[in-house]
Image (cartoon, rainbow, N blue to C red):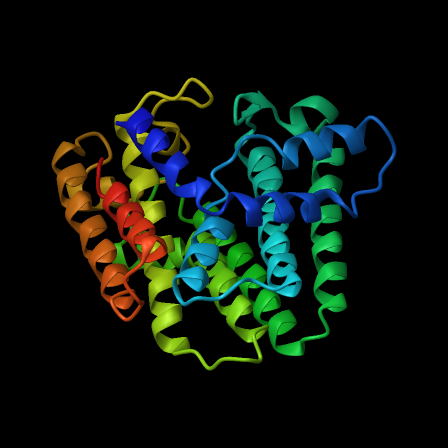
Amino acid sequence: MTSNFNERYKKIKQIADSEIEIIENKITEEISLAEPMQSFLKKFLLAPSKRLREVLPVLYFKALGKELSQKQLEVLSVVEIVHNASLIHDDIIDESDLRRGNKTISCEFGNKLGVIAGDYLLSVALSKLCKLSNVEVIQLFSQTIEKMCIGEVNQNFSRFKVGTIEDYIDKTKNKTGYLFETAFLSCAMLDNSSKYNMNSLSEFALNLGIAFQIRDDILNMTTFDKTKPYNSDIEDGIYNAPVILGSKEDNYSSGIEKTKGLLNNYIQKAGNEIKILPENKFRLALEEFLELLGNV
């Protein structure tokens, strides 16, 4: 199932290859640290990745007939830098040795330098945002990073507790959804030539991010991934939708099926928001991606 997703997504991603190449160059262009940290961090940032938070906005705006400006590509590089900073911090919290099949920064250099590396990436992101000279975009990122931190803190204090599905959705928005939303909204904010339905754009991006995280939480319980422990969330006391909907942390098979229904609900919500887009290969690619999310 996962291999089929990767194969089909690779074809979707190829449609945005030229933009992703520029974004990846922008991701590492301001990294300046002592060796060997600099080379390791650049390798980490450029490791094979889905780049969802960049690919999907590119497809959305190209569906509208837009060619993304350098500022828009720059802000998407900031999104990816913030995402990677959060991954570095997550690896420290989770005591993970592997990320994307490679050693984590904290495993290679220790937790102290791992924390600094994550913080350094956030400083690079801030520098890039300031150069865009758009206060609205800076405020958006500030609010989103705050929510990401709140989500992580709340998750820590909720460990080994079966919360409500509303709590789970709030956490999912904070940890994942709002950064997806920020990627789309910031691109729209940097386009002075057009007016966008910001509510629709926000709904699409947020529901997309929530759906992606729900899918990931299902896979955490149903798919073996050699890069991380099987059922690692449950072992760490992080009880996500399958446990909540299954009522018990040791009997969640029924919860998985109910969570698939929850996933499809958010996929449908996202799909409703792209019906306004012109019918072209970019919209079709977005629709195919939503279909892929439901294949778990």
Q: Position of residue 261 (x, y in %)?
A: 15, 48
Residue, far right: 34
Residue 111 in sight here: no
Q: Position of residue 58 (x, y in %)?
A: 48, 56
In the rendered picture of this protein, how many numbered marks are placed on residues?
A: 0
Relative placement, left or right, of 13 versus 165 is right
Residue located at (19% from left, 56% from top): 265
Residue 207's place in the image compared with 216, above or below, is below
Q: Position of residue 276 (x, y in %)?
A: 28, 71
Q: Nearer the viewer, residue 222 or 161?
A: 222
Residue located at (27% from left, 47% from top): 288
The quadrant of the image that shows the N terminus is: top left
Residue 58 in sight here: yes
Residue 123 sits in quarter:
bottom right
Residue located at (59% from left, 65% from top): 141
Residue 48's place in the image compared with 212, above or below, is above
Q: Nearer the viewer, residue 216 or 25?
A: 25
Relative placement, left or right, of 295 versus 199 is left
Residue located at (85% from left, 28% from top): 35
Residue, far top: 226
Q: Position of residue 254 (x, y in %)?
A: 11, 37
Q: Nearer the viewer, residue 12 or 119?
A: 12
Residue 258 sits in quarter:
top left
The quadrant of the image that shows the C terminus is: top left
